[in-house]
Amino acid sequence: SVIRIAGICGSLRRESCNKKLIIRAQQLCAEQISEAQLDIIDWSQLPVYNQDLEDDPPKSVLKFKEEIADSDAILFATPEYNWSIPGPLKNAIDWASRVKIGDHGDVFAGKPVAIIGAGPGSYPGSSGSGRAQLILRQTLVVLNMIAINSPSVMLTGAFEAFKEDGSLKNGVMEEKIVKLLKELVISHKRLKSTI
Ligand code: FNR
């Protein structure tokens, strides 16, 4: 059966360059990796985390968590906000790390995960989300995920990086995205074969 990668974009902005990046990753996956499918999760309706809501969690939380549980691997696309990940993205991760649904406790645990990201401008003013990516990695440790380390996909100059059709002007960057997705697939297969 097809390997399901859940895409989580850290920006809710309509014209988000990270959204453009993960949509491009989705297209590249469809075109070049027949055994995998990338579905982008809509988490825009999640409330601000409050532990009091855990006893009767909002539907949006359960839906988000189920979508993660149903996936084989995760791809984050994160912007960098003040040298960290956006608060809303951390909020989403925090929700998914808590509420228990059915057999789904730790929905992130044991899953391969990769990170991509984009930002306008060039280094050091913009790191192409690099500092945020490093901070996100820290959280992946406690979530007990299997993080792919290479290649790194940090897109600088992101407002000028895309063509009209949504592809990236820089072909090497596209190759890195495909390589990263393939690494996710390999990691998933390796895990399955050893269980
Ligand atoms: C930013 N931005 C930003 N960029 C960066 O490279 N390093 C940073 O520390 C920050 N900090 C920051 C804080 C806040 C609150 C905002 C709103 C923005 C700029 C950011 O990279 C830019 O807005 C991107 O366009 C955000 O990603 P999306 O929404 O285009 O995906």
Image (tube, rainbow, N blue to C red):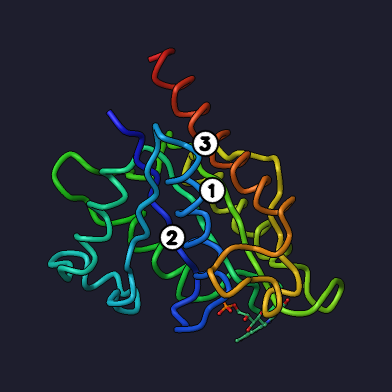
Disc 2 residue crowd, few under 14, some 14–19, many 20+, Cα 10 Å? many
Q: In x, y percent, where is residue 48? A: 34, 79
Q: Quadrant of residue 134?
A: bottom right
* Between marks 1 and 3 in the image, the one whose residue lies nearer the viewer: 3
Amino acid on which disc 1 is placed = Leu
Q: In x, y percent, where is residue 124? A: 87, 73
Q: In x, y percent, where is residue 127? A: 78, 68
- Residue identifier under label 1: 140
Disc 1 residue crowd, few under 14, some 14–19, many 20+, Cα 10 Å? some
Q: Regarding mark 2 in the picture, which secondary structure is present there? A: strand
Amino acid on which disc 2 is placed = Ile
Q: Regarding mark 3 in the picture, which secondary structure is present there? A: helix
* 17 is higher (above) or lower (below) than 194: below
Residue drawn at x 29%, y 74% is 46
* 85 is higher (above) or lower (below) than 110: below
Q: Could you tell whether 62 is left or right of 166 in the image?
A: left
Q: Regarding mark 1 in the picture, which secondary structure is present there? A: helix
Residue drawn at x 62%, y 71% is 163
* Whole-number angstrom distance, CA of label 1 to CA of label 3: 15 Å
Which mark is on residue 75?
none
Residue drawn at x 12%, y 67% is 56
Residue drawn at x 51%, y 56% is 76
Which mark is on residue 8?
2
Which sits earlier in the primary sequence, circle 1 or circle 3? 1
* 138 is higher (above) or lower (below) than 49: above
Q: Could you tell whether 58 is left or right of 6 in the image?
A: left
| Residue 4 or residue 68, whichever sits in front | 4
- Residue identifier under label 3: 184
- Outermost residue on the top side: it is 194
